[in-house]
Image (cartoon, coloured by chain):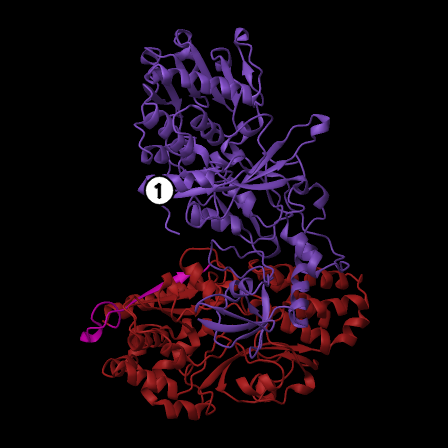
């Protein structure tokens, strides 16, 4: 597929090693960037309309622009805590193409004036963390990291930090707390990390995929990048397709590719004998779409219009043989387990709903329970300290509303 | 200044003020549990959500700052629903043991349920099992079932005392506040934890199960146990006079005073209140039957004034000895200085004070009397009691007895003709003096004290004084009038405030510019 930009070299032997990477033109973006002015880089990234790939979709260039020009250390944190259920794109990017990420880190740091960057990686990705550390050592040896990078006078250290397996640490401020060695609880915003972040200093936090796109923007230009995707939403997305499809896996496709096409063309359609019932289009937090709602473009705006969200672009395909009560049970179990416990509605609400759903699954539910789930979820929605509350309430409400009849039939 | 509208009431506040604070100014209280003035907003309880015109979501009143023209709604349907929702969540996991909870009557969760809740519980699942009655410190019991995880306690120990004995363990619904590895809360400010807990999760062993908060009266005073001068609230039961049940102090809590103690007091001041209850002297004792004195103030005061007058007449006022202490107020020390040092030129003036002990770098000072600075500024040369010198050429001793050592005085006092003791407590000294007169404690009278930093703080009686006791300032003003020295000067001293005016006129240190 010609569209591939991030994953174009996936499958090349030993591509994760710097020599192979350099053979394919690696680190040219860094060389080019170091000869540019930081403001020029910022302009280019802004023009490319690179939106955050972690879930919220905030434009990366604008985020960088928020960093105040103060006389304080600044930090970059790469969010590699890939924890959203259904999401498995960053692990491939990091294990197949670690130097692309490092290039992105160097360019972003040079642009913002950062000399320490952290990759916060989920604890379970042990092998990938080791691979990243290997790549960092290689880059250092070649003079792409460390002091006076390529004799430009710019210094940068990259540190890999492994998390301990909490979903909440993928939330950017909880990530910062965890990185500081504290309990992974989200912080109250404002202040936003761009002004008060890691160790109370200005901090940029970007997803692995977001950062990996930056070298490509620098090499090929913002216009090229926008053409790869949509005008307001540049580039490609790595869609992770899982569930009852013939060929589950990651698919790098232009932003705006139809969901139907992703499932039925790229992922080979439904497994033999299985019929589509529902799709969760953007990781477990995204509201569910019914089978007749999938003729839709996969970009931020189209999915918001459809009442869902693109999130981490993780597509979970559910077939008619799967009970929605079981899906709901998986959702409530996950969020009640992963709630950090800091704020009231999320701490108690997710657990309460989970208890109701488990009771329903035991065949001890009533119609009143379904109303209660909706009422409780709406008492969580929009009322929590961090987005985890919404992430829990949205799928719970959408499954309950859209599949109410099926749930009632299980009572 | 920024002008905003809270429930359509216009209010002007300084830039940077939070909506919660601005609402207070407009007379509107916004419910909150985790927010405490002493700490930066935490935003975890979600009780203070308010609606702000133009913003899509409800916002936290405890953290959002005012903007010119902002329109805030604190009682809209959306807000009330959200509050109900939060309360419903909190109460789902909260035990219904208010009848045996010390916090009942004083509990914010109870108050807010009264205001916004009163719904029937929809919770039909099992509550989480949590530990009750966990001892987490010398005087502290933690009930994890009642805990609403506001983390005030955790933040207090992290940000104020910096000892960090408490933390949050586990996560989600299993989150709980606890101590690390069975290492208890161990610092001199631990009692504040029970006070700042908005519910009954941390209770105080010293107070636990002894009374109900609604039986208690409250009075403000100043802690006299060191020279910091922390503001306190004394909580007491008035007693039942007719049934012979005496007044009883049940606890002391910190009173907010940002200039001195902030929101806190030390454990020494909090738990050291038994002296208010126990062993009180409440009547006049006369040990010299041959004097044929009625044990009433009028008679005794006339007798004492007569004694002094006699010495004045004979020009022998140098044969008066005084034992004072630094628990006396500025006003009382002023009168003592005036009468006995300036006017009468008494031969000996000693101070009997509690000994210095170790202080800390927060509130507790090494000096353990509340008004040593006041005594110094008044012009006293503070000398400890020299019992050998005391009886030399002394005819009359007037002692203020709180910290007198009985042992040193035995055998010495016998050589003095007239011995008068002012005391708040019964003690072994009672048999050594001729006349013992009951006086109130600082909590039971008005006046002012000068703290370690030279700050003059006024106080008034938080409690009634027991029995026949009479404040020293009033006794001294009468002595001044009746001892035949300067009637007119002492005539107008009918209250501590009136005395203080004269103090300010005479000694520039006490001149309060206001």
Expressed as whole percent of the image width and height from the top left, the position of residue B472 reads 47, 29
Local SS, label 1: helix
User: The magenta stretch spans which residues?
Assistant: A144-163
**What chain is tagged by disc 1?**
B
Judged left or right of residue A15, residue A382 is right
**Colour in which chain A is drawn:** red
Q: Residue at x 32, y 42 (%)?
A: B509
In the rendered structure, does residue A160 fall within the stretch colored magenta?
yes
Residue A277 lies, with reference to residue B195, above or below; the image says below
Expressed as whole percent of the image width and height from the top left, the position of residue B131 reads 63, 43
Q: Residue at x 29, y 85 (%)?
A: A40
**Colour in which chain B is drawn:** purple
Q: Residue B138: tell me if it is visible.
A: no
Question: What residue sits right under mark 1 in the picture?
Answer: B505
User: In terms of depth relative to the viewer, which is nearer, A120 or A174?
Assistant: A174
Residue B483 lies, with reference to residue B433, above or below; the image says below
Expressed as whole percent of the image width and height from the top left, the position of residue A200 reads 37, 62
Crowding at mark 1 (Cα within 10 Å: few <14, some 14-19, many 20+): few
Which image quarter: residue B388? top left
Judged left or right of residue B150, residue A115 is left
Expressed as whole percent of the image width and height from the top left, the position of residue B414 reads 42, 7
């Amino acid at each position: 597929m010609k569209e591939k930009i991030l994953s174009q070299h996936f499958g090349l032997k030993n591509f994760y090693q710097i020599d192979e990477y350099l053979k394919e033109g690696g680190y040219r973006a860094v060389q080019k960037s170091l000869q540019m002015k930081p403001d020029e880089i910022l302009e280019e990234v802004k023009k490319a309309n690179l939106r955050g790939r972690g879930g919220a979709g905030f434009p990366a260039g604008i985020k960088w622009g928020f960093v105040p020009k103060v006389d304080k250390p600044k930090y970059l944190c790469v969010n590699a805590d890939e924890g959203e259920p259904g999401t498995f794109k960053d692990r491939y990017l990091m294990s197949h193409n670690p130097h692309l990420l490092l290039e992105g880190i160097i360019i972003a740091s040079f642009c913002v004036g950062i000399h320490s960057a952290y990759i916060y990686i989920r604890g379970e990705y042990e092998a990938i963390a080791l691979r990243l550390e290997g790549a960092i050592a290689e880059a250092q040896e070649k003079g792409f990291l460390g002091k006076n990078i390529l004799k430009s006078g710019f210094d940068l250290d990259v540190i890999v930090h492994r998390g301990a397996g909490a979903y909440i640490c993928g939330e950017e401020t909880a990530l910062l707390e965890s990185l500081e060695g504290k309990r992974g609880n989200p912080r109250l915003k404002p202040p936003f990390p761009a002004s008060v972040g890691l160790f109370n200093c200005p901090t940029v936090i970007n997803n692995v995929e977001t950062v990996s796109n930056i070298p490509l923007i620098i090499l090929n230009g913002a216009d090229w990048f926008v053409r790869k995707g949509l005008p307001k939403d540049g580039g490609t997305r790595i869609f992770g397709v899982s569930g009852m499809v013939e060929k589950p896996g990651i698919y790098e496709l232009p932003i705006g590719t139809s969901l139907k096409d992703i499932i039925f063309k790229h992922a080979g359609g439904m497994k033999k004998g299985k019929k589509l019932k529902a799709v969760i289009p953007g990781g477990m937090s995204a509201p569910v779409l019914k089978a007749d709602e999938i003729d839709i473009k996969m970009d931020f705006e189209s999915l918001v219009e459809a009442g869902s969200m693109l999130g981490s672009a993780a597509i979970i395909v559910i077939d008619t043989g799967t009970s929605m009560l079981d899906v709901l049970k998986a959702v409530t179990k996950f969020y009640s387990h992963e709630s950090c416990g800091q704020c009231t509605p999320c701490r108690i609400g997710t657990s309460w709903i989970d208890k109701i759903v488990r009771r329903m699954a035991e065949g001890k539910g009533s119609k009143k329970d379904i109303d209660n789930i909706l009422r409780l979820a709406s008492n969580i929605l929009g009322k929590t300290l961090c987005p985890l509350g919404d992430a829990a309430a949205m799928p719970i409400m959408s499954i309950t509303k859209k599949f109410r009849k099926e749930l009632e039939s299980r009572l | 200044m920024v002008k905003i509208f809270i429930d359509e009431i216009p209010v002007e506040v300084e830039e940077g003020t939070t909506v919660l604070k601005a609402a207070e100014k407009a007379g509107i209280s916004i419910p909150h549990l985790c927010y405490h003035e002493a700490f930066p907003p935490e935003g975890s309880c979600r009780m203070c959500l308010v609606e702000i015109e133009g913003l899509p979501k409800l916002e936290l009143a405890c953290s959002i700052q005012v903007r010119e023209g902002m329109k805030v709604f604190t009682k809209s349907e959306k807000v009330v629903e959200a509050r109900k929702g939060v309360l419903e969540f909190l109460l789902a996991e909260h035990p219904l043991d208010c009848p045996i909870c010390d916090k009942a009557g004083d509990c914010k969760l109870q108050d807010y349920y009264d205001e916004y809740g009163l719904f029937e519980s929809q919770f039909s699942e099992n509550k989480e099992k949590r530990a009750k009655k966990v001892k987490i410190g010398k005087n502290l019991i933690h009930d994890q079932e009642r805990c609403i995880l506001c983390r005030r306690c955790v933040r207090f120990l992290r940000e104020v005392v910096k000892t960090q004995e408490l933390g949050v363990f586990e996560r989600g619904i299993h989150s709980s506040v606890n101590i690390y590895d069975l290492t208890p809360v161990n610092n001199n400010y631990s009692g504040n934890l029970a006070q700042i807990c908005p519910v009954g999760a941390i209770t105080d062993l010293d107070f636990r199960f002894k009374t109900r908060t609604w039986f208690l009266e409250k009075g403000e005073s100043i802690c006299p146990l060191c020279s910091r001068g922390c503001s306190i609230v004394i909580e007491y039961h008035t007693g039942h006079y007719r049934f012979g049940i005496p007044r009883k102090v049940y606890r002391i809590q910190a009173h907010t005073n940002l200039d001195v103690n902030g929101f806190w007091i030390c454990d020494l001041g909090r738990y050291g209140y038994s002296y208010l209850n126990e062993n009180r002297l409440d009547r006049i004792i006369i040990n010299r039957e041959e004097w044929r004195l009625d044990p009433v103030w009028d008679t005794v005061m006339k007798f004492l004034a007569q004694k002094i007058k006699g010495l004045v007449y004979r020009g022998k006022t140098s044969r008066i000895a005084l034992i004072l202490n630094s628990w006396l107020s500025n006003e009382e020390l002023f009168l003592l200085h005036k009468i006995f040092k300036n006017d009468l030129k008494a031969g000996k003036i000693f101070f009997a004070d509690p000994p210095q002990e170790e202080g800390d770098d927060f509130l507790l000072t090494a000096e353990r009397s509340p008004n040593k600075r006041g005594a110094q500024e008044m012009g006293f040369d503070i000398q400890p009691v020299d019992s050998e010198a005391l009886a030399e050429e002394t005819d009359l001793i007037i002692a203020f007895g709180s910290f007198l050592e009985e042992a040193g005085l035995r055998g010495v006092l016998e050589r003095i003709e007239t011995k008068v003791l002012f005391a708040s407590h019964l003690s072994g000294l009672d048999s050594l003096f001729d006349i013992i007169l009951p006086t109130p404690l600082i909590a039971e009278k008005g006046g002012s004290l000068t703290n370690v930093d030279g700050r003059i703080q006024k106080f008034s009686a938080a409690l009634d004084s027991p029995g026949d006791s009479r404040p020293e300032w009033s006794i001294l003003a009468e002595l001044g009038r009746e001892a035949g020295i300067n009637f007119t000067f002492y005539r107008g001293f009918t209250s501590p405030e009136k005395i203080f005016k004269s103090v300010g006129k005479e000694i520039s240190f006490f001149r309060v510019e206001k």
